[in-house]
Image (tube, helix red, strand yellow):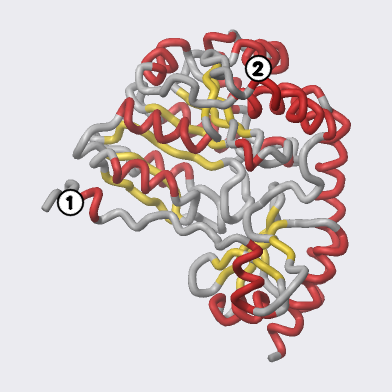
Amino acid sequence: MIQPPDYIKAIQPYVPGKPMEELERELGIQNSIKLASNENPLGPSPEALKAIQKSFSDINRYPDGAGYYLKKALSRALSVSEDELILGNGSNELLDIAVRTYMKEGDEAVMASPSFVVYAISVQAAGGRAIQVPLRNFIHDLAAMAEAVTPKTRMMFIANPNNPTGTINTREEFDRLMEKVPDDILVVVDEAYYEYVTNPDYADSLKHFRSGKNVLILRTFSKIYGLAGLRIGYGIAKQDILADMNRLREPFNTNSIAQRAALAALSDEAHVTASRKTNETGKSRLYRELEELGTCFVPTEANFIYMQVEDSASVNQKLLSMGVIVRPMGPKAIRVTIGLPEENRRFIEAFKAALVN
């Protein structure tokens, strides 16, 4: 019988949530709300929707494999060269390409725990070892992560803001880390929730990119831009790093509809502003409600809130029975996406009932 390597067999696959329609059928409920995947509750930009509709007539053609127009727009917006940009089928694909480019069996990658689970999965799939450093006060302990570096370390992953806690590392913390990290290590900075951050002390990863450091900055159109279903993200790094990654990037890895929608979304600042305002308003209300309930939660710089509960499996099941879908995060925590006002109200009402019953 054909068998994969042991390190592949040992991977615990990422478990996605079920479709809302299937959950409603199984539970016998209707009108459920999904607050589990950190999606933009306002949906995509109206300009992106127009671009999508215009794209339908030529889907018989292969997409632009180089992403010419989108990279040109990103180049202008970020003041980086087009050769310092790479497009991916979501930023998820790019981190996987980076791992396969720079790691081999027996190598190590340093990351925080808990953080985005795909980091460890990608490293293990390459035969590498994920060195997971516990968070400190729900924040990446960058000093401890620097101490975890060994001669076998090839990569370091930093989610900023972190998923699932929504916390950030500050400019000073990140600057100190970059002074310590050896030049032969690629630091991957995952900024999927970058556009939601309001803290002025947020780390400036682009500064280190511009100074010539070996960093790969990942961003996405899945979150504030509302294009999660089209799977498109991008990376920023030095030309030599991206030249290596492009050896493994598949031709036509981003589809034509996604490219055009992202291009239109990038130009719609009004939608980004409205999305950020909706998030900040919802965040403030949820903070007040959770404080009144005495629920411990982590202040967030993203579009979700990480909160502690006595029994996450029980709370999750009770919320599901009331048509509210959240994400359990271990035995004593859940993560809740900040939604529209009505969705936030429904979550709080259901959460109160789940705590009582």
Residue at the far bottom: name it: 357
Q: Is residue 232 left or right of residue 93?
A: right
Choose between 97 and 290: the one closer to the eye. 97
Q: Which mark is residue 122?
A: none
Q: Using the rendered view, name the quadrant where residue 54 is placed.
A: top right
Q: Closer to the N terminus: mark 1 or mark 2?
A: 1
Residue shown at 87% from the left, 60% from the top: 341
Residue at the far left: name it: 1
Quarter of the figure that contains the C terminus: bottom right
Residue 294 seen: no
Residue shown at 45% from the left, 43% from the top: 143
Choose between 62 and 224: the one closer to the eye. 62
Q: Using the rendered view, name the quadrant where residue 191 is placed.
A: top right
Q: Position of residue 267 (x, y in %)?
A: 80, 22
Q: Is residue 149 left or right of residue 200?
A: left
Q: CA distance from mark 1 to mark 2?
A: 40 Å
| Label 1 Cα crowd, 10 Å radius (few <14 / some 14-19 / many 20+) | few
Q: Amino acid at mark 1?
A: Asp
| Label 2 Cα crowd, 10 Å radius (few <14 / some 14-19 / many 20+) | many
Residue under numbered circle 1: 6
Q: Position of residue 79 (x, y in %)?
A: 67, 12
Q: Is residue 289 left or right of residue 72?
A: right
Residue under numbered circle 2: 70
